[in-house]
Image (tube, rainbow, N blue to C red):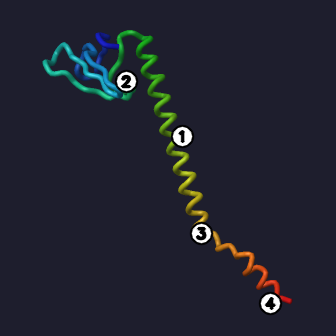
Amino acid sequence: MIKKAVVHKTFGKGTIVEKKQNYIKVQFEAFRERKTFLYPDSFEKFLTFEEPDLQKKALEELKKIQEKKEAEHEAKRLLYQQQIEEAQAPPKKSKRATAASKKTEQ
């Protein structure tokens, strides 16, 4: 990925000069300073690889990350919903309380 050409909507053409974990640094032709972007997030809206295969790979990675985040969010939502339902449910009677209420009914 290092030395691969990209295009930014505002900054124009540039070259990736560094990649670490979830970010890349790009040296643009029109700027002296290197710009830092989240990878692969920035390829959704701001950056485009000049090579279509690399662009496709970046978007596939982004999709996997988004699907994972959505699954985690849904799991948290379901857990929260379950906790609310448990808190709102009437308290369960213990076996002793159930046996005692049966005796008083007779």
Q: Which of the marked residues, 2 or 3, is nearer the chain's N terminus?
A: 2
Q: Which amino acid does label 4 sit on?
A: Thr
Q: What residue do we see at 59% from left, 69% from top?
A: 88
Q: With 40 as the anchor, is 106 left or right in this view?
A: right
Where does label 1 land, which residue? 71
Q: With 66 as the anchor, is 95 left or right in this view?
A: right
Q: Disc 2 and disc 4: Cα gap in Å? A: 71 Å
Q: Which of the marked residues, 4 or 1, is nearer the chain's N terminus?
A: 1
Q: Which amino acid does label 3 sit on?
A: Gln
Foreground mark, 2 or 1, reads 1
Q: Disc 4 and disc 1: Cα gap in Å? A: 50 Å
Judging from the image, what secondary structure is the residue with disc 3 in?
helix
Q: Which of the marked residues, 2 or 4, is nearer the chain's N terminus?
A: 2
Where does label 2 land, which residue? 43
Q: Are marks 3 and 1 in contact (CB under 8 Å)?
A: no
Label 4 packing within 10 angstroms: few (<14), some (14-19), many (20+) = few
Where does label 3 land, which residue? 88
- List x then y, in percent, for residue 104: 80, 90
Front residue (pair 34, 93): 93
Q: What residue type is labelled 2?
A: Phe
Q: Which of the marked residues, 3 or 4, is nearer the chain's N terminus?
A: 3
Q: Disc 2 and disc 3: Cα gap in Å? A: 45 Å
Which label is found at residue 62? none
Front residue (pair 35, 98): 98
Asked where in the image residue 46 lies, by quadrant, the reply is top left
Query: Is residue 103 depicted above or below 92 in this figure?
Result: below
Where does label 4 land, which residue? 104
Q: What residue do we see at 48% from left, 28% from top?
A: 63
